[in-house]
Image (tube, helix red, strand yellow):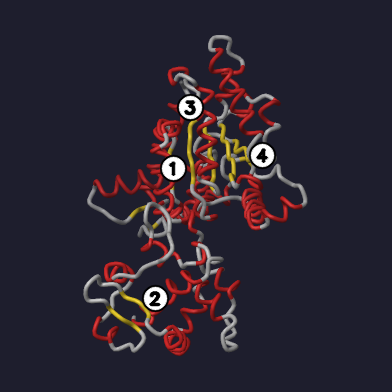
Amino acid sequence: MIARVVELLLTAEIFNRHENLTEDDIPKEIRKIFYTNGGLKRPLVVKENILKGFVEYDEKELRKLPFVDVNSFNRQIKITSFDVAVKWMLKNGFDLIKKNPVLAYFYESYDSTGVSYEEAKKYSKPRYSDSEWLKGIIDELTKDESTAEMLGLVRIFSPEDLDDDLSKVVLDDEQLKEIRKIEIAIEEREWLRDVGLREIGKLLFIGPPGTGKTTTARHLSKKLLLPLVEVKLSMITSQFLGETSKNIEKVFEIAKRLSPCILFIDEFDYVAKTRTSDEHAAVKRAVNTLLKSIDEINLIDHGVLLISATNHPSLLDSAVWRRFDKIVEFPEPSEEVRKRIFEITLEKIPGDYRIDELVRMTEGFTGAEVKLVVREAVLSALMEGRKELTMDDLVKAVEDVRERITLKNSY
């Protein structure tokens, strides 16, 4: 543990000395304990409370180090002999050096250590994936009257605060390919900008409710480590909000202030409904503002991945379709996808059941409805005091969900 203490002290010292190092170079677990008002400010000062927030340690063992001083008055802990600390860390914490970009930056040119700064950066997550960083930005937006009101109409998520189960999202090959393209575009933003390919990163998700459009947007936030801004189009274009065009502009402004991030606009078919309505001129103007705002934002220049979703693509006219560089379909899941959803959902639930048979029984079900089958079966079993499922539990749940689907479709 004492090596982690020295890692923290050296990280602070080297970061303070080298202005070209950024917050992203500091490992996430160290960066988070230094946050004040959503960011880091030089010089980083290590005090006892900060150190205890990072790692458990024995103060007697710490005081034995010849290059460390603990100030009894202000409880500040600092390195008194940098060179001695550097040599100690090389001998006692080499594995930590290899995964810490700040340390690797220094040791890369120190005594032929073979440490690589670029390799170390692969282990460090960016600051915009931190919930503390996001909170600081939101606090600043709250202080601004022009954006404070809009924060009540959007949902903003830090990727680390999203459900870990999103890693188990089941996507087909085509959907996975489009996600990989976005990953590459983010990695190669500068090159794409240099060659003039800017209109990238505007996706339109289409498909019935429950097929995974919102879940996939959240999965992308988790996977790409990008903050997520969720908004329902019907909310921000409501005639009861007053100056709706300005509200829409503020949503895009919030996204740019959070850059890099994902802006997810749900219920996008609301565009079609308002464009064909003669009743609300103010709302129609707001929709035109929305389309213009989409034209004026992109992943390459602004760091904003725009995802819009609709359950009713047939309502969208050509003016809407041409705003997006890629259409991603979310159809009712295939047998293979339904099987994978059952496997994942039932993974930790004991019981005797036949997944292949369940897959055949759920033809036409969405992914959400497949998960609902498992939920209903589990709750029914718990009602009877059981924590193991039988095939009868699941068959009954399939029948119940099918009845629910039939009832919903009858209205």
Of label 3 and label 1, which has the lower sequence position? 1
Position of residue 72 relative to residue 211, above or below, is: below
Q: Are the two marked residues, 4 and 2, in contact with CB atoms closer than 8 angstroms?
A: no
From the image, state whether disc 1 or disc 4 is nearer to you: 1
Of label 2 and label 1, which has the lower sequence position? 2
Q: In the rendered view, does 148 fall on the left or right side of 311? A: left
Q: What element carries label 1?
A: strand
Q: Mark 3 points at which residue?
A: 236
Say which residue appears at 60% left-offset and 88% top-offset: 112
Q: Mark 1 points at which residue?
A: 156
Say which residue appears at 67% left-offset and 36% top-offset: 324
- Locate residue 402, reporting x and y percent: 44, 35
Residue type at the position of mark 2: Leu
- Locate residue 120, reporting x and y percent: 55, 73
Residue type at the position of mark 1: Ile
Q: Is mark 3 on a helix, strand or loop?
A: helix
Say which residue appears at 58% left-offset and 40% top-offset: 307
Q: Mark 4 points at which residue?
A: 327
- Locate residue 280, reporting x and y percent: 53, 12
Q: Mark 2 points at which residue?
A: 9
